[in-house]
Structure formats: C-alpha cells, structure tokens
Amino acid sequence: MIQKQGFPISLVFPPQGHFTQPYLALPCLKGWLRAHGFDDVELVDANIEAYDAFLTREYLEGCRARVAQRLPLERFAGVRKLGFEDLAAFRAAAECSASGAALAARVDEAKSVLRGGAFYEAERYVPAVRTIYHALRLVSAAHFPSELTPHNFTMRYGNDRSAEVLAATRDEEENPFLPFLRAQVLPRLVARRPKVLGMSIIYGSQLVPALTLGRLVKEALPDCHVTAGGGFLAYIGRKLMGAPGIDAVLDSLIFHEGEAPLLALCSALQEGRGLEGVSSLTWFDRSGSSAVAVENGAGHPIRLDAAPAPDFGGLPMHLYLSPEIVIPYDVNRGCYYGECTFCTLPTVIGPGYRTRSAKTIVDHVLKLRDALGTSHVNFITDCMPPGLLRELPDELIARHAGIRWWADARVEPKAYSEEGCARLVESGCRKLLFGFETATPRILKMMKKGQSLKSVLDVARNCSQAGISVTFYAMVGFPSETSEEAQATVDFLVANSDVVREVSLQTFHIDEESHVFKTPAEFGVRIRSDPTADLQLYHDYEAETGMTQGQAAEMFESMMAALRAHFPLFSGDNIFWFMQKSHYFLHLARGTSPDEFVSRCRRRADRRRQAGADPALIAGADLAVVALPFSWAEAVAGLATPAARAARPDFLTGRFVADAEAAAAAGTRPLERAERALVYCGETAEFAEVRSDGARVLAALQRAGGLGELIAGLPAAARENVERFAGELARRGILLPREEARPTVRGAR
Amino acid sequence: MKTPDKNDTQKPDARPSKRPEAKTREERGTEPAVPELDFASLDLRVEVVEERISPGETNVFDK
C-alpha cells in the first residue's frame, strides 16, 4: 500500500443532529481512507461540540443578555391585543424571563446527569432533559426567530431556496452556528490546514450550518478543497450544485456512498490530477472566468464485506449526552426488500444492496467494543435481512460478544418465530423497530408493504414475549387514506399496547425520489410544485379522495393524543426516554425488562396524578414568578394548532408552506390582555401559568416557608382554596415535597 | 406595525419582576408570616400546557 502522508484530511459532522450518540458515516470514511494509505484523517463532531458549547452557564448568560435586548418582555406591556405574528416572540420573552436564571445555573448539572449514573434515576433524568430543552429555547430566543431543539434547527430562511440558504450562512444575528464555527472550529482547522474538508449532511437541519462552515473555510483556507456528501445531499445535491453562489461555499459534492469517491478525490488532489476521473463527484471547474459545475458519472459501490471497521478515533465521546455510548454500526447498505412505495431511504446510499457477513460484523463489533469501552450497539440498517437474523445471533453467541443491541427490522414471520426471538435475545437484542405503517389492508397494499396485520402482530407478540421491546413506525395521510382508516390504525395500536411499547408516528410526505411523485396518478394525487423554490425536494399535493394534507395534520394530533393516553412510555414526561435516541434502550441494555420499564412509567404518572396538598410542600430555591400582560398558555396553544405550525418550516422538509403565515394569522384570534404570571421551577424545569392572585399566594407561601406554615390557622374555605391550588401546582411539578427540593450547586442568580 | 396604546396604562404588577428573595427568619422579624389576603376568594386557577410532539420530534428513523 502506498502511504499518503503529509495530506491532512478533516471530516466534519456539522450541526444539527442527535446529541446522544456519534454518527456513523464519518468513522466509516476515516476507516476506509486509513486503510488506503491516508493516515492523517481527523474527525470533528461539530454538532456535539456546538450543543456542548451552547449548553453552558456562560453561553446561556450571554443568551439572557441578548434576549433582554432583542426580545424584552416590556415590549408587550403597552400592547392591547397580541396577534399571531407576535405569539412566538411573546412566548420566548415570557419563558426566558421566568426560566433564564435557573437554566443558566442548572444546565451544566443537567448535562452531568445525562452523562453519568444519575441518568438511570427518573427523578434526575426527566428534569435534566427538560432543562436541556428549555435551555435550547433560551438559545433560540437569543437568535429569534431561529429555533434550535434537540431534534431540529430552523431559521426564517427556507431550505428549499438557495438564495435564502446562502443568506442564512451570513446572518450574524440569527445563525447561532456562525459565531460558534468561527470561534471554535475554524481556528483549529486553520492551524491544521487540511487539504480536504469533508462534511456529512444527512439532515436538512444541517444544510445551513454546513454551508456556513464551508464559507468560513473557503475564505480562510483557499487551498483547502471543501466537499460534502450524505443522505440529504443525495436528494438535493444536483440542484444545489446548479444554484448561483454555491461555489463560494463548496468545491465539490459526492453523491451516494462516500468511500470510493472520497478516496479517489483525495488521491487526485494529492497527485495534482484533475477531477474528471472521480466517480460520483460533481465539482466546480474554476479554470474559466466563472465556476462551472461538472457532473461526473456514477461509480460502483464498494464491496461492503471487505470494508474495514469504522474508525471512531478522535471523536469526543465524553461530550455525548448519554451515560454510555451506543456504537452505530452498519450491517448492510440498501434495502433487501426495496418495494415500499413511500420509502426513498435506500436511494440515498445509491444502487445495489450489500451486506456484511455475520463473521465480519462480529469481528468489527468486538474490535469497537474493546476500543470504545462500551458493549451497546445500534445496528444501522434499513431493515435486518432474514438470513442475517439467523446467522448474526449465532455468531454473537458463539463468540461470547456480550453486547446489547437494537435495530430496524422488517416483519418476517419465519425469522421472528418463538425460537428465533429467543436466539435474538440471547445474542443481546433488546429492541426492534418495525414498519407497521397502517392497520388498513387496502393502504398496506398500496404501500406494497408485503405484510398482513396478522403477521405484524404475530411477530410483535413473539418479540415481546421473548423480552424484546417493540417499536412500530406508523404513518398518517398516505394518499386516499380516510380519517376513519387512520382512526382504525390508532385503535389497533391501542388494542395491542401490551406488545407494542413505542410508536413512531409520521405524517406522509412526498419527496421527488418517491413512487408517488413519479407516478402520482397511480395514487390519485396531483403534485403541486413551487417554481420559485430552486432546491425543492418535498411537494404538497391534492388528493382525489381521502384526507387532505391539512386534515392529515389534524389527524396526527388526534392520534398522538390517543397514543399519549394509552402508551405508558408516552404518558406525560415519560416520553422523553422515547424522544432521545437510544435513551430507553440504555435502560433495556442495563437489564430492565420492557414490562418493568412500563411499570415504572405508570408509577411515575400515577404518583404525579395523585400528588396532593401535602403540608410539607415548598417552593423550590429558584422558583421564579414573572407577571405577564397576556396569557402564556393561550400563546402556546395558539402556536400549537396545525395551521400555526404550518407557518414554521417543519422537521422533515425544512420549508415554508406558501401563505401559511397569513392563513394562520387569519385563523387565530388575537389574545386579549390578561393579568397572568408565568411560574418556573428550576428543580423540575416545569412551567405553569397562574392568575395574579396565584402569584400573590406563591409569594406568601415563599415567605411563610411552606404550605403547612401558610395554611396554619386559615379558615376552612380559605384553606380549601389554597390547598386546591397547591395540590395542582404539586401535580405540575411547581411545588415540591420538602425532601425533594434540590438546590443548584452554585445557586441561581 | 403595532403602536403602543398610550391610554392603556400599565399596572404595576404587569411589569416583569423578579421573585422576591426569601428573607431569613431574622429579617422577617415581626412581619406576619401570612400577608393579609382573602384566600377564600382568590382566583387560583392554574394553566398548564402539554408540550406537543411534532412528527419530526418522534423520528428515530435516520440513516
């Protein structure tokens, strides 16, 4: 092998993605490059670095100061009515006023809880996650109207318009990643002077931050070749490379599987060759007066079983917000089934289905287990193939791998027999996620799922009885689906909530790779396109029969409400375990059975419901009460309607729906002035709204020292009124039993 | 564009305020532990908001 020294390469995972575990693609690329002689490859997880930097006391104090300047609550003091266009700003101002001090004081501790043993204590975990969520609201408010959550990042700019995307990369006020990348990531890159910067963009939420970094690097390091790849670019890459101004932030783009093209790109650059011969690459030819995008032909996929183990070396494992790392590892690429008419995921990796052998998988898993010091694995696959479901458990058991793992799967009745499930559990399988989609056979047929309800249920029951936690993916709004059919799906799920622990419910979307987009008449839909959106990937549609898109969005709310009412893991704040990737799995991996976990969730919900006006109730050390000129609860409710949500770019598409803002404004009654107070408890990270009378009672309770002291000697009617109030606040986590109050280490300011 | 209504005078307790710092027993001195409030007639309703879960926020299906 020819050693290719003196050619530094930096591979960056840009914000925004999950914060619970590392992403796989870049370690795969690093392993491949190193195996082919490029020994100076650096991995940078700018996503987890950004979350870690934002979720600090110092940063949040800065955000508080910015919010006080940009979104002062006083702005609303003289306003008579609050229209839809001001709801989000009012909500942000109110919440930051009430929670900002406690969040800044408690955020570092919250990260420690998620990274340490306290993670496994529900009463520590849930407030910590809430604190993280609210802290990100504070970060968002400081960059209003941008929104950063644990799962998404959106700005006022649409992801489907290149001019807006490029404008976002320059927005010093509203793009929180611009100053972060400039101050925290760029100096290291400038010091290192990589010859190639490669970025993996798998989510739409990464597009602006990635191109922001691309711009910074191209300005600071003109000789560094900036390239990007990843699932999201597999969809929009061609349009992106054809858009004006993109040559200022990128030099090339790799389509589909990255190993072979990136190696060829690095080799060509090192050897000073042109890029014409690099397969699956679109690059800017800058030899003329202006840059011209050149699209090379597609290359062949690699032989996956011969690929080396992913190399996670250099990733900041201590920063992920989990107590133990769950290693992502890809067992195959592509989908062995590949028929589902709604699914375009297999297209992002490129043509061809390939799998690693069970022996290779276990070789690599054992190597990673020992190198990373964790025995938890997330097998990455579109769905686990039946052959591997037999061979992999055997290999893991025979070699005493001692791992715990979870994966996506397809309903294959033979593979998930009672005996097969027992082997899976013995091999360490603790959770499987199946594409259930719908309880309507007619829709299943249109989807070409190739499964019956009976087979789905048989597989789920066998898994559940063996001790494997089952998650179902479900969908609402597939073309022609009626609301009655969607209700039947909910009813089916609720009826089987003894074997299905979690449901990942999605609304149907049409992207340009889908069967529905390519043959709309077959599905009875008319596709709507926006000619002004040059990066458009997702399309609205009009259905000839069944629910409209708007009705499907309404139905989603109804379905989610039913799931939250009937699934213990979804009840109240138990849903946080489901929402943070791998967090529920970590409990299963530690030995908690799905039944035990469900019982814990039930007990938590019951305990909260049954809380009453215990005389030992006190206000926490940093309880904050902020007087408001409008109702916060009404503002939040106004922002939660489907019409209002359509005015913001959604998670999946990252785009703005035409006229949605105006429609939401027209359909939302302005809020009347109201004397309210927003209450925030730092210990539980809970908000509640009270009347001004309630604020006075809370102040009295704080002065008295506790509920018992406050109500001592009160007449019966007064006592009853206060106790009812205190009981409600206890159930909402605002008042705490004296023994549960947990002051911050340094105290809130 | 909205303009503040000059006639809509702001009530003192409508301004953002910080929670009064808890006083020590000594500081409280002889002030009554419970202020003079007619607790029986106070409006003590509590509004809470169940945080909605968006489709995307439940998406664990990423590659």
Image: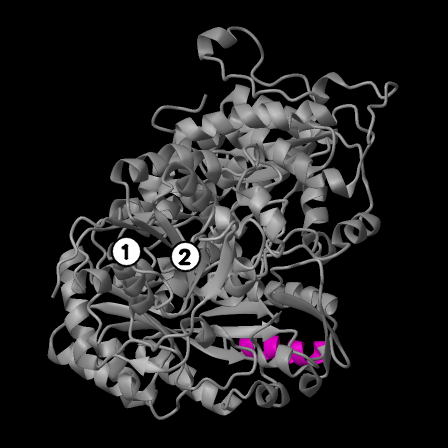
The Cα atoms of the two marked residues, 2 and 1, are separated by 20 Å
User: Is any part of residue A665 visible from this angle?
Assistant: yes
Which of discs 2 and 1 lies nearer the camera? The answer is 1
The stretch in magenta equals A483-493
B56 w.r.t. A401: above or below: above
Q: Which residue is mark 1?
A: A272
Kindly identify the residue that appears in the image at 71 percent across and 62 percent down.
A531
Quadrant in which the C terminus of chain B appears: bottom left
Kindly identify the residue that appears in the image at 32 percent across and 75 percent down.
A467
Q: Nearer the viewer, residue A486 or A27?
A: A27
Q: Residues within 10 Å of mark 1 (few under 14, many from 20)?
A: few
Kindly identify the residue that appears in the image at 60 percent across and 52 percent down.
A162
SS state under label 2: strand
User: Horizontal and vertical percent for residue A398?
Assistant: 12, 80
Q: Nearer the viewer, residue A299 or A229?
A: A299
Any magenta on residue A322? no
SS state under label 1: loop
Q: Residue furthest right?
A: B7
Give me the disc on residue A228.
2
- Dominant SS of magenta comes to helix
Which comes before the other along the chain, label 2 or label 1? 2
